[in-house]
Amino acid sequence: MIREISKKRQGSESGFGVIALLIAVAVVGCLGAAGWVVYRHNHGTTLKVASNTSAKTVPTTSAKTRTEQPVNPYAGWETYTDSQYHYSFMYPSGWTLSSTRNVYGETLLSPAQTVDVVYEIIQPVPVETVAFTPTLIDKLSSANEDLTVVGGYSYSTAANAYSPGYVVVDSSTLGANGPTVGASSQFAFGSSFVTLVGNTQYVVDMNVVPTNKITTLSDAQAWLNSTDAITGRLILESIKYNG
């Protein structure tokens, strides 16, 4: 009997030992899992914050330091100065500068020889108006004596040719209302603007014209939009009185 009780007690103690061992393993597993979750949570948050901080600070710093430099269309250009009539203008070094014939002034020829820029001083002469369609009316700065560059074209039935070009004019040539871009009107294309030297009145004629005959409207419009013609317009827009 005593032996049976002892066996039963040993069996009971053995069963309790197994249960205690299982409970201990379960507790250790739970603690380990909890620790892993806390570790991942803490390190995951740190990485995410670092990533977000980097994404926010880099564009902000770049936006603050980024600056846009204005483009100077006259960078590297030469300057022509008229010491007698006190006007000056700028032109690319690749353009050919030469004296005009029979009158006081200079001409510029584009490298492709498709554009002439004429600067000349002449006595006032009667100028006939023509039917002229402006494509550009560009008011110059106040330092340029209230001048305006007008671009566009006219058509001559007698010559069966279009005459596109750009010209510098003053307010008296533009008239009270002035021409309208895209609308044909009577315009004294060759009159340019007037200057006084002492008591003598002179006309400053400065314009951009093609070197060849143009017979179609599409060719006239293409010439006005060509690189050399637009460069010629920039030359006109650089004119300045230095007296």
Image: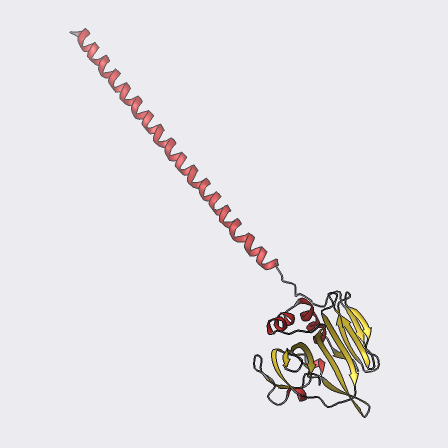
- Residue 188 appears at what percent x and percent y? 67, 86
- Residue 198 appears at what percent x and percent y? 82, 90
| x 24%, y 18%: residue | 15
Q: Name the one closer to the observer, 139 or 57.
A: 139
- Residue 231 appears at what percent x and percent y? 69, 69
- Residue 196 appears at what percent x and percent y? 78, 89
Is residue 22 left or right of 97 when viewed as pictured? left
Q: How many numbered marks appear?
A: 0
Q: Residue at the left extreme?
A: 1
Q: Name the one closer to the observer, 11 or 68.
A: 68
Image position of 90 with respect to 143: above or below: above
Snapshot quadrant of residue 11: top left
Colour scheme of this structure image? secondary structure
Q: Name the one closer to the observer, 92 or 66.
A: 92
Image position of 146 with respect to 37: above or below: below
Is residue 132 left or right of 88 when viewed as pictured? left
Image position of 79 with respect to 122: above or below: above
| x 19%, y 12%: residue | 8
Q: Name the one closer to the observer, 59 or 29.
A: 59
| x 53%, y 49%: residue | 54
Q: Which of the image's four quarters has the C terminus?
A: bottom right
